[in-house]
Image (tube, helix red, strand yellow):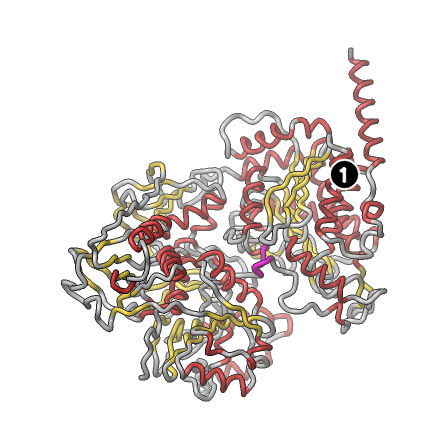
Amino acid sequence: MQKIYQVLLVVICSVSFIMAQQIQSPSDFLGYELGTQFTRHHKVVEYFKHVEALMPNHVKLEKYGETYEGRPLYVSYISSEENMRNLETIRENNLKNAGIINGTSSTNNIAIVWLSYNVHGNEASSTEASMKTLYTLLTEKQDWLKNTVVIIDPCINPDGRDRYVNWFNETARKPYDIDQQASEHREPWPGGRANHYLFDLNRDWVWASQIESQARLKIYNKWMPHIHVDFHEQGINEPYYFAPATEPFHEIISEWQRNFQTQIGENHAKYFDKNGWLYFTRERFDLFYPSYGDTYPTFMGAIGMTYEQAGNSRSGLGILNDEGNILTLVDRVAHHTTTGLSTVEISSKNAAQLNTEFKKFFNTSGLKYKSYVLQGNSDKIEALKSLLDKHEIKYGNATNGKVSGLKYSLNAQGSMNTTSNDLVVSTNQPKGKMVKILFEANAKLSDSLTYDITAWSLPYAYGLETVASTSLVASNASTSKTVSNSKNTNATGYIVRWNSLKDAEFLTDLLTQNIKVRFTEKPITTDGQNFDRGSLIIVRGDNKKVENLDDLLVNTANKYNRKLNAVASGFSKSGPDFGSPDIKLVNKQKIAILSGKGTSSLSYGAIWHFFEQQLHYPVTSINTEHLGKINLDKYDVLIMPSGNYSRALNEDVMKKLQSWIKAGGKVIALDRALSTFADKEGFKLKRFKADEDDNEDNDKEKTKNLIPYADRKRERAKQMITGAVFRTKVDNTHPMAFGYSDTYFSLKLGSSTYKLLESGYNVARIGNNPTKVSGFVGSEVMKKLSNTLVFGEERLGKGSVIYMVDNTLFRSFWENGKLFFVNAIFFVNNNAFEL
């Protein structure tokens, strides 16, 4: 019997070997040598399907989603025939090992390695390498697959990739030009790095604002791999970066995760040294900000790593770098293929320990805070629950009682009374360490020189009062309340409170249905209820031409779960009556956004996405190069994304813009766009400058040149803000702040500071004693933050300029700031008058 089994095993292995030999190499399948031209996404998918068709017992292709432009998203599973037969069992055992699903895991010494390619579309070499890696694993490295399941995502960002590849193919010379100044090395705005909405998908793992990220999270959390590699490209003069990463490491990262990165790096180095390829480690790329393709997997128990090859969009098919070496796409593909294969090899050799250490990671007993209790607006709680659902993080509703601990509004010990409306998120769950990372008030930073923002705490981002408790807080299964409205045809009108982005969605839906809506600038008491500033009022008399008004209102309110409060009379018990000048009609604004040269493509994309996917309201995109010829009178609002407009807005265009504003136009400037107006004639915005007479500052200036060369970079950190959260004071009587309290926690992304407006309105500001609650702020810039502007309005003739120093739409995750932006569009300077 044993001999028969051995014979069968030999036969099976022989068949697998024969089938592997029948697979076409990527070069043979595509009809050109891999790396000699860029492959469009659909041809990459066809190659993976070709391999699956010939080796179905070793390869399985699974579609997990589609991009905004309709391109398919796939992962491919590659392993031995036995592992493929037991693929579902391997997956379930791994989740049992982590405690994510119930049951006892059988012995599961199978390593799960996930290789993700081309998250940045114009870092295009890695998708080419994915095909070569697949082919090599099946034709040369099948032994590694006996105890390893390899998951390959050949292209995370097909929309961005094809944008770059199509541009390059229509631009490049044949043969390719290695001159750095050639057009084929100068990708135009917006470039192929980002997705359809120009979001950086490598910063979106946690926030999951984009459809590609949402789809990926579902399949990623279905597997929870032990190893995850995110393939990238960097500048043309930096040869290759691979693990280990540099500090800061988040404190949650285990010693095993740190040490095994080094083992992986040493394995790569062996191959790079053999080939005479240069590389570097332990520089630039840290493991702190949680929304990267290396940190998110790391905080989910994996060994998460970034690999960076010299190249990006500047390289094309070949370029002469500053050291006089020609860097080709063929080289780039070879390097990425090598590190991909080396990762599988070292994982296969350590499969048993990977499983053991993976299980250990999910022990959360050592975490200080056991529960986070959140209280506030129900819409914001629902929005947070939606985010947690994407990560399969558990939560519940609190019970009536009291909880004590670190109170976020105080940034100190405190307590609050709880009700069944409050949310409890506990660290006593498999993903408890990710809960800590996302909810902690101020993440511990081991080094101030970091690659990204240093503050992201969800309670501040969602505007929810929170207490972090060292005790496990009891909770019940979470429920959501549904509003069911009924029409009242006898009512004079309906009032809807204004507190959240859901209220804004309700408003824009009504406007697109041509239903006239008013808002109140003063509190109202009517029919026994109090309504604060910003509350929406739909008056029957305004909408006589609207058929079935009540039915439309009820259906729309139910759609957004809004409560319609029917009002019998326009005569208020206190506050303005419905016909008061303080109850203004919301204008159906015609909005334009600047795009193109000078604008930040990421900032533009965040605005574009906000209007199309969240607010569902039409906007017109205007290229900065055409602004001089555009008839601005067609628009009520012009939005300026963050950017440098010094070239785009020349003197003539600025005069035109000023005239339009004075005639009643409204400009909303975000972040760096404020420099267009700061210290310029005709505008009151002034940059904050340190007191030049301060002797201490003058002494420091004199000693700057004495700082050693090696210390200059760290010295510059004193002038930096790397994404820190500040408590700000809010004038919530101003229309821009309707729906807010007098305190707002703002995410500050840069060190530019502006004085409070001497004339106009300082809607939100940092006070005399700046209060930073989270993140890193350099000691020198901290001194410049006292009494500085966060949000403000300057009147210019009949119009306004809205200054938003802090960008509330950044990466679409600072949910509590978005209503400021909406208010600026629809409420500020409504029915403008000249001061």
Residue 712 lies in quadrant: bottom right
State the residue at coordinates (55%, 33%).
Answer: 95
263 and 609: which is toward the camera: 609
- Whole-percent x, y for residue 63 in the image: 63, 41
What's the magenta bit mostly, secondary-structure-wise? Answer: loop
Q: Which residues are magenta?
A: 196-201
- Number of numbered tags placed on the structure image: 1
Q: Residues within 10 Å of mark 1 (few under 14, many from 20)?
A: many
Task: Identify the residue position indicated by label 1 in the image.
Answer: 51
Is residue 25 shown left or right of residue 436? right
Residue 835 lies in quadrant: bottom left
Q: Quadrant of the N terminus?
A: top right
Is residue 396 shown left or right of residue 445? left
Is any atom of residue 769 visible in this view? no
Residue 111 lies in quadrant: top right
Q: In the picture shown, does residue 407 fall above or below 778?
A: above
Residue type at mark 1?
Val
Is residue 587 shown left or right of residue 99? left
State the residue at coordinates (23%, 52%).
Answer: 489
State the residue at coordinates (31%, 42%).
Answer: 398
Say which element carries label 1.
helix
Would residue 110 be counted in the magenta stretch?
Answer: no
- Whole-percent x, y for residue 441 in the image: 41, 55
Is any atom of residue 608 visible in this view? yes
566 and 154: which is toward the camera: 566
58 and 2: which is toward the camera: 58
